[in-house]
Amino acid sequence: MDNSRRNFIFGGFNKVKKITKSAIHDAETKSNPTAQFYLRPPGAVPEEDFINLCDKDCFACLTTCPVYVIQKVQNPEIPEHNTAYIDPRIAGCSYCHDFPCIKVCPTEALIEPGKPMGIAKVLDNCITNQHEFCEVCFPTCPEEYQALFKNKDGVLQVGRDKCVGCGSCVSACFLVPKAIEIHPLELPVIE
């Protein structure tokens, strides 16, 4: 196959992939009122302070993260641009015991080891709400917290006093849109 034909075929596949990814993101954003909430790495100061303190040119927490889940917000039109965050739809934080991301932060944007990052909420589209069996997210919850459980009807619940908002349950969920989301600590989670 000559290069022009190969480029045409693979170029088409890449365009379809981008369109599909964009459509999934748009669907999740529309169904998710907290879509603009950025899950910050462990120990983050309050959001407004974090935006001001997080060094936009620093990659210390990204490169020290042992599971490489910390990213930079990529939207030059918003104040959060180039600040550190975790996209739980892709991968959750492993909530390390020694918090290496906090130790390397040069600006004190990350300072409070053990502080919850957010709070998980189970959404209506969770399979367990239809009384079907699913425990895909259970083993991903950090062992020492075990914030996920089922009520007497077999419906997935989150132990609010145990959840650290790491997002591991979100990334484990295979549904589109995801059946679990992380809410900021400052906002009440409405049932």
Image: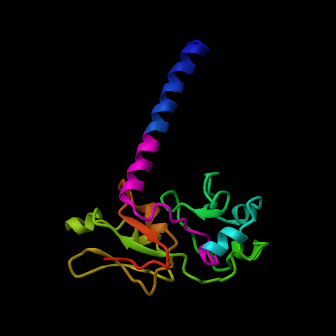
Left or right: residue 18 compared with residue 24: right
Q: Quadrant of residue 112?
A: bottom right
Query: Residue furthest toward the right?
Result: 106
Q: Which residues are drawn in magenta?
A: 20-47
Along the line of sight, the residue nearer the viewer: 64 or 24: 24
Query: Residue furthest toward the top?
Result: 2
Q: Is residue 98 above or below residue 51?
A: below
Q: Position of residue 65 (x, y in %)?
A: 68, 65
Q: Is residue 116 above or below residue 136?
A: below
- Asked whether residue 68 is drawn in magenta, I would say no
Left or right: residue 16 compared with residue 133: right
Left or right: residue 95 compared with residue 131: right
Q: Quadrant of residue 152?
A: bottom left
- Asked whether residue 33 is drawn in magenta, I would say yes
Along the line of sight, the residue nearer the viewer: 107 or 89: 107
Q: Position of residue 150 (x, y in %)?
A: 30, 78
What colouring style does the render use? Answer: rainbow
Along the line of sight, the residue nearer the viewer: 30 or 2: 30
Q: Is residue 9 above or below residue 149?
A: above
**For the C terminus, which image quadrant?**
bottom left
Which residue sits at x=38%, y=50%?
Answer: 27
Counting labels gives: 0
**For the N terminus, which image quadrant?**
top right
Q: Position of residue 130 (x, y in %)?
A: 20, 65
Which residue sits at x=40%, y=71%?
Answer: 138
